[in-house]
Amino acid sequence: MPEFWVASGHHLTRLDAAGRMLVTDELLRAWLARPEVLPPPDACAAERALHQRLMADPRRPVSEPEKAALQDPDARENWHFLLSLRDVLLAEGTIEAGYLRIIQTGMRLPVVFLNQLVQLILRNALEGCQEVAVLRAAELMFRPQRGHVKEGALHLADEELVQAHEAEMHASPLTAMFSGGIGGLDVLGSGNEWTYWSRSDAHVMVLNFGGDGAARAGLARAMEVFLRHLLRLEVTIEPMLRADEVDLRWFVGLDQTGTAIGNALWHGQEPADTLIGLFRLQFADPARMRPDLAGQPVWLILGMGKDMGVRMKPQNLITGLPLAEPPRH
């Protein structure tokens, strides 16, 4: 079976009987070795010593005086976030349970940490998936995208990839990328799907989100798998081509822009941003829904801001669904 998203660290975890990822020392050490975590050359002695102690024993408790000894305020904040994340995951026992606790309690963490957890969870949930359209579309759930209209269809490229080359390109960097500015940047489809496996960690393949139905269907499948794995919730999610006669009795914005679009439509106003994805979610078991909404569809709205950015918040799927009872972790 081809491997994908090796950088997620999935291979450093072990699964429990329920198929959820146990928090291993190997995974914690990999996080400690990330460039954002490694003490910079000008780090104080206390920070370097703390990092060395944790590399030797990544589960080691860290006292408040140890944190306070860090001279750089930014370093103290960064370590606070990292250690808070570690402690929640260790207390809950699995990555999935820790993620649910973080989302349900509203714990404040940098977006990069939340995205890392989502990628790891999706990598586990999508084990054995051979549908490249699903895997590339799933990247939207943990990798911000930048939109570009090409031949009348919205194409999405990895935002970090675009930003990395903006300094080297003048007008419309994404247009330049499509014109050959970056070698290896291909639009997924037309027989090149097999190349995804060898470069999944590079995030260099463009998704024809507007012109390829498989792309939108792939995102729907990824969201189904995400909910099934985390909440043991069976749903069917269908991408819609038209928004006629949509009863927004209950909707979930898949991103901040999608929420704003839904609110505007609910109040009969013209949305300020662009609707790029509308999905109908239906519960397999209506008893899992709030009684007053049982049997009704839930509408999922994905938007694109004026900067052409698409930044999904998959945690909205956890907190925004009208469940009959709060999700158990």
Image (spheres, rainbow, N blue to C red):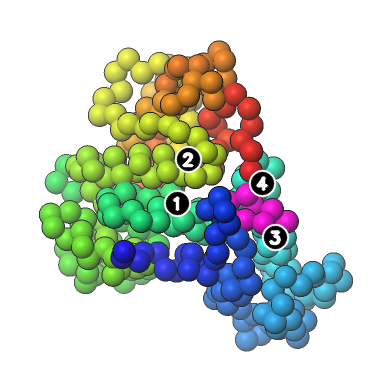
Image check: 250 left or right of 323?
left
Q: Distance between the residues labelled 4 and 3?
A: 12 Å
Tell me the residue that label 1 is attached to. Answer: 125
Tag 1, which secondary structure? Answer: helix
| Residue 228 on image: x %, y % | 47, 40
Q: Which of marks 4 and 2 is nearer the N terminus?
A: 4
Q: Which of marks 3 and 1 is nearer the N terminus?
A: 3
Q: Which mark is residue 228?
A: 2
Instruction: In the rendered view, tell whether residue 141 sits above or below residue 15.
Output: above
Tag 4, which secondary structure? Answer: helix
| Residue 177 on image: x %, y % | 23, 63
Q: Earlier in the sequence, mark 2 or mark 3?
A: 3
* Residue 78 location, quadrant: bottom right
Residue nearest the viewer, comparing 303 with 236: 236
Q: Which of marks 1 and 4 is nearer the N terminus?
A: 4
Residue type indicated by callout 4:
Arg
Q: At 20% across and 43% down in the image, what residue appears?
A: 212
Residue nearest the viewer, comparing 194 with 276: 194
Q: Which of marks 4 and 3 is in front?
A: 3
Q: Which of marks 1 and 2 is nearer the N terminus?
A: 1
Q: Earlier in the sequence, mark 4 or mark 3?
A: 3
Residue type indicated by callout 2:
Arg
Tell me the residue that label 3 is attached to. Answer: 90
Q: At 29% across and 55% down in the image, what residue appears?
A: 130
Tag 3, which secondary structure? Answer: helix
Q: Which secondary structure class fits the magenta region best?
A: helix
Q: At 73% across and 74% down in the image, what residue appears?
A: 72
Tell me the residue that label 4 is attached to. Answer: 101
For label 4, the crowd category at 10 Å Cα-Cα, with few meaning under 14, some 14 to 19 and many 20 or more, is some
Instruction: In the rendered view, tell whether residue 48 sits above or below residue 8.
Output: below
Q: How far apart are marks 1 and 2 (CA)?
A: 9 Å
